[in-house]
Amino acid sequence: MSVPGNPLPVVLAGARGHGGWHLHNIRRLERLGLVRLAGVCEPAPLAADDFDGIDAMEQSSDLDALLASTGARIAVICTPIQTHTELALTAARRGVHLLLEKPPAPSYAEFGRLTAGIAAAGVACQIGFQSLGSHAMASIRSLLADGAVGEVLGVGGAGAWVRDESYFGRSPWAGRRRMNGVDVVDGALTNPLAHAVATALALAGSPNAEDVAEIETELFRANAIEADDTSCVRVTTTGGNRIAVAATLCAETAAEPYVIVHGTGGRITFWYKQDRMLLQRAGHGPVESVHGRTDLLENLVGHLTHGTELLAPPAATGAFMRVVEAVRTAPEPVELPASVWRSLPGGVSAGAVAPRRVVTGVDGFVVACAENLSLYSELGAPWALPAKADAS
């Protein structure tokens, strides 16, 4: 799909860090004639060394002024979590459509304010859950509708990642639950492994806020941060299904995150970062397939130019935001004692090797949570069990 001679002007708010991915993606879509990078909003301007050709772009630290001067039709917002709502509403009030990074907001109240403002402005908004653009999603839904794995019993999710201590120093808000009295909620389930949660909810057919009946959380931290780095959540839907997702940034070995749909007659495993799925069912050999993916910004352009249905509108992330709210309002993450984690060499940061913390046995427990739709404590993880009272 292209719009010859009429690319949509795009402003990117937040071009550093993960924003660099968006910068390159915008340039990819420029080459297809779909968009034009009209401006970049950053507190400190990018230099030519940061990105080739950036010196020709209009830059400003004032998003509202930049949207006005560039005539942008789309704003891509990849800024700290706690700034999402205000920046998105600034764009919406100007009639500018949005691609907003996940999580869309740090609280359910802010999410409500965001969605109300977007609706009042009449603009389109896409939330940056790229996994929802995977063509494997439609394939899995079709298989489930055909009864390929029988009746769905539940959906599990597993994310075991390795992050060293420098990861939590990448920005002032990293690893924070709140900052200067404002919610941030930068935990394992709500930010780095948020895709596992949102994808599991989507495949369970329960993406909307009203689909959620109950949420259980267990939050822990091995690192010297406020937020959780090792956690699990279980959602019970209004239809009685269970979705359990376990996540850690303190794994022994990094693994591809995945979502698994359990059925009475088989299972479907989806490695969402790879767009890869595996169908296993009784009486058949395993079938593995790799699928394409529709880019969410490209999908937003298609929506604006041809009426294509959005893949990740705010309403489809309502259940995920209920999880964010449950994490936000849960008791502070339990600090794990040094006896249950060990320090290993991590990556190189600022010319030195940054240590990383590994929680004993967490890799296996993450897998077991997804397999059994259980919480860490139910599986007997010693670091997740309540402390026993002194018997004396």
Image (cartoon, rainbow, N blue to C red):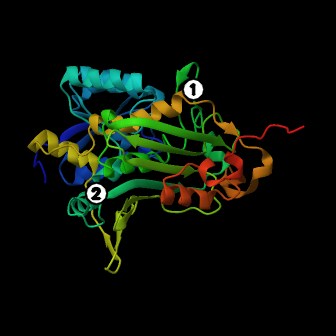
Neighbour class for label 1 at 10 Å: few (<14), some, many (≥20)?
A: some
Checking the image for residue 137, the label placed there is 2
Q: Distance from label 2 to label 1 (Cα)?
A: 34 Å
Is residue 66 depicted above or below 298 in this figure?
above
| Total numbered badges shown on the rendered structure | 2
Q: Residue at x 56, y 30 (%)?
A: 330
CB atoms of marks 2 and 1 within 8 Å = no
Checking the image for residue 359, the label placed there is none
Is residue 297 depicted above or below 280 in this figure?
above
Which amino acid type is shown beneath numbered disc 1? Arg
Q: Residue at x 41, y 42 (%)?
A: 236
The x and y percentages for residue 112 are: 34, 23
* SS at mark 2 in the image: helix
The x and y percentages for residue 187 are: 55, 39
Which amino acid type is shown beneath numbered disc 2? Met
Neighbour class for label 2 at 10 Å: few (<14), some, many (≥20)?
A: many
State the residue position of label 1.
Answer: 178
Screen quadrant of the C terminus: top right
Q: Work out whether residue 218 or residue 377 is closer to the camera in this orientation and state it.
A: 377
Q: Residue at x 64, y 33 (%)?
A: 226
Disc on the earlier residue, 2 or 1: 2
The x and y percentages for residue 8 are: 18, 39
Q: Quadrant of residue 309?
A: top left
Q: Work out whether residue 17 or residue 205 is closer to the camera in this orientation and state it.
A: 205
144 lies left or right of 229? left
Q: Is residue 170 visible?
A: no
